[in-house]
């Protein structure tokens, strides 16, 4: 991990530009999407940020993704920070640019403030005809499924668990 971080700092950051990988550990993403879907409508993020080890409220979109992955993934990831979560994918060679056809179950990273760093994330639930649906924690204070153009400039990367 230290080597990966040092390499990225010294030589810059590159994202893969190829087909999205298969997700064999989660039945092509269906289990992760099912877990995330079961949380739609939850308006209190406490169980997610507590699961990540916090005893006080924090921005919880990454905690939501961590909790969902923890329910069905062998490779449990516990992050409460979108940049750290993105770095986890990058160091495992599982971070992809926006020029792929993403698959359900992938993490979707957003840059809402225009600083080229992820500040929000969710779980891709579907992709078709140039639009994606994403299940997000802390979307207007709750778990919700939102639809975006797949070309939305706020979408900056995808991560394959």
Image (tube, rainbow, N blue to C red):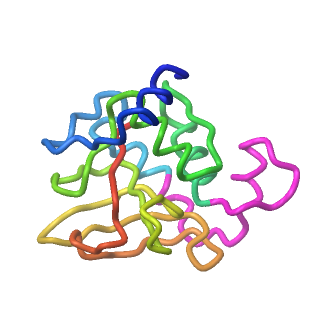
Q: Residue 61: percent from the left, percent from the top?
A: 59, 60
- Is residue 153 rendered to the left or right of residue 138? left
Residue at position x 60%, y 79% from top? 140
* Residue sitting at the far right: 55
Looking at the picture, tell me which residue is in the foreground, 15 or 80: 15
Counting labels gives 0
Q: Is residue 58 inside the magenta stretch?
A: yes
Is 50 located above or below residue 59 in the figure?
A: above
Majority secondary structure of magenta residues = loop
- Is residue 116 rendered to the left or right of residue 65? left
Q: Residue 43: percent from the left, percent from the top?
A: 68, 72
Q: Is residue 65 inside the magenta stretch?
A: no
Is 149 located above or below residue 44 in the figure?
A: below
- Is residue 106 rendered to the left or right of residue 66? left
Q: Residue 86: percent from the left, percent from the top?
A: 46, 45
Looking at the picture, tell me which residue is in the foreground, 161 or 38: 161
Residue at position x 68%, y 63% from top? 59
Q: Quadrant of residue 129?
A: bottom left
* Residue sitting at the far front: 10
**In this picture, which residue range is highlighted in magenta?**
36-60
Residue at position x 33%, y 50% from top? 158
Q: Residue 36: percent from the left, percent from the top?
A: 49, 55
Q: Quadrant of residue 15?
A: top left
State the quadrant of the C terminus.
Answer: top left
Residue at position x 28%, y 74% from top? 152
């Amino acid at each position: 991990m230290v080597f990966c971080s040092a390499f990225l700092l010294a030589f810059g950051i590159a994202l893969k530009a190829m087909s999205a990988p298969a997700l064999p550990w989660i039945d092509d993403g269906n289990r992760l999407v099912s877990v995330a879907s079961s949380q739609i409508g939850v308006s209190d993020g406490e169980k997610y940020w507590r699961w990540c080890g916090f005893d006080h409220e924090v921005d919880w979109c990454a905690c939501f993704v961590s909790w969902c992955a923890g329910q069905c993934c062998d490779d449990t990831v516990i992050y409460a920070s979108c940049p750290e979560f993105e770095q986890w994918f990058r160091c495992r060679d599982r971070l992809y640019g926006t020029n792929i056809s993403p698959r359900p179950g992938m993490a979707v990273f957003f840059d809402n403030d225009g600083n080229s760093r992820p500040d929000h994330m969710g779980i891709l639930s579907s992709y078709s005809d140039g639009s994606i649906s994403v299940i997000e924690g802390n979307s207007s204070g709750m778990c919700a499924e939102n639809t975006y153009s797949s070309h939305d400039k706020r979408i900056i990367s995808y991560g394959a668990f």
